[in-house]
Image (cartoon, rainbow, N blue to C red):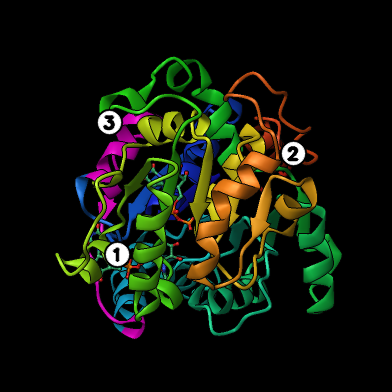
Amino acid sequence: MRIVHVLGTRPNFVKMAPLIAAIGRRMPDAEQTIVHTGQHYDRLMSEIFFEQLGVPAPDHMLEVGSGSHAQQTAKVMERLEPLLVEDRPDLVVVPGDVNSTVAAALTAVKLDIPVAHLESGLRSHDRTMPEEINRIVTDQISDILWVHSEEAIRNLELEGIPAERAHFVGNTMIDSLVALQDRFRPLGACREFGLEPGSYLLVTLHRPALVDGPLLFDAIAALNQVSTEMPILFPVHPRTRARLAGNAELAENLHLVDPAGYLEFLSLEADAGAVLTDSGGIQEETSYLGVPCFTLRDNTERPVTIELGTNVLLGLDPARITEIPVIVASQERAVAGVSAPPEPPPLWDGHAAERIADLLAAQGGSSV
Ligand code: UD1
Ligand code: UDP
């Protein structure tokens, strides 16, 4: 079987690393080609993930870079198409919900090449989110849908997608976390910033609905206030960095730093007293780690993390950030690592990629 994997952004690399490795182990004769679209390109948003996750260097770099949605999507399509025409793989794999995902799926399906979508079926039911459009389109045109939670299957059914296309395999982002536990748990990355495990609030914010308007500055004001009770470490996404660009007054205990490498970030997450985020993946990782997570959004495509009790949906309301220290105190959570985390959702067990490789191997390279 000849497989082309198309990746473009930080969370894509984390989701795909275990799958590429598992296919290599389970199907040693499979020919895997890695295409990096270049949607993310800074070393700390791209290369460091390949190094830390042991992903082979990409075979092709499309170098699409930043741009409007149409520009980014169109550039991926234009630059991927000739590769697929020449290569004619048996399968194109696309992860997640970013512009690179939908662009690659569209390119492949129009060439009549089967597409598999990893992390299919998530829905925020909020079509103002660019990712929601990417998810809906990608799921409709993909031949194989690998899902990580039961609600994803219901979401697909509601959109009339035949059940036989969906496979409940588990969460490959958690596979990556589990595989690196021995490396990130002892790291103590927070100490490099003079912070003690269990004492600090870790923050990431990058969604356009929050950071592309005035709400970002309301959030900084609320974080300044919280930092008098709880030190804050905020590894800043480049979109957010560009918006802040020296325009915000920062309190002494609010530390804005570069994006963290993956191992360092997992260490910071595992040792945090709490996490404030609008990221999708971080809602999942904190659930697995049992670290209290506060999501600064009106909705989530990951309701399983709310049901588990680790994630609180604050709403797109920066004023509510000031409630975090009180809620954390009332949760009476012991210092990180002492209290037992809740049981993770079904199949978030470190073996999702192996299940996918088994499914592919069972098809024996015949038409998918
Ligand atoms: C993208 C995804 C989002 C995902 C996020 C993960 C879409 C529509 N959005 O958002 O779903 O949650 O990645 O992090 O696909 N930039 C740099 N260096 C980089 C990459 C980006 O400086 O390496 C800056 C550029 O100014 C760029 C901006 O960040 O314009 C936004 O990048 P882009 O890839 O368009 O969207 P993200 O906000 O990263
Ligand atoms: N991450 C990281 N360094 C950071 C912030 C996040 O390594 O400074 C990792 C995080 O552990 C998770 C992934 O990046 O695996 C989440 O990516 P992001 O929040 O950018 O995207 P989303 O999940 O929202 O699409």
Task: Tell me: 100 left or right of 36.
Answer: right
Q: Nearer the viewer, mark 1 or mark 2?
A: 1
Q: Amino acid at mark 2?
A: Ala
- Residues 134 and 188: in front is 188
Q: Which mark is residue 193?
A: 3
Whether ligand 1 has any atom under 8 Å from the Cβ at mark 1 is answered as no
Give the alpha-carbon distance from disc 1 to disc 2, as whole Å.
Answer: 44 Å
Q: Would residue 19 appear left or right of 39 to someone viewing this image?
A: right
The magenta segment is 44-70
Residue 270: x, y in percent?
Answer: 52, 30
Quadrant containing ligand 1 reads: bottom left
Residue at which label 2 appears: 362
The amino acid type, in three-letter code, at marker 1 is Thr
Q: Residue at x 34, y 34 (%)?
A: 56
Query: What residue is shown with label 1?
Result: 240
Which comes sooner in the sequence, label 3 or label 2?
3
Q: Quadrant of the N terminus?
A: top right
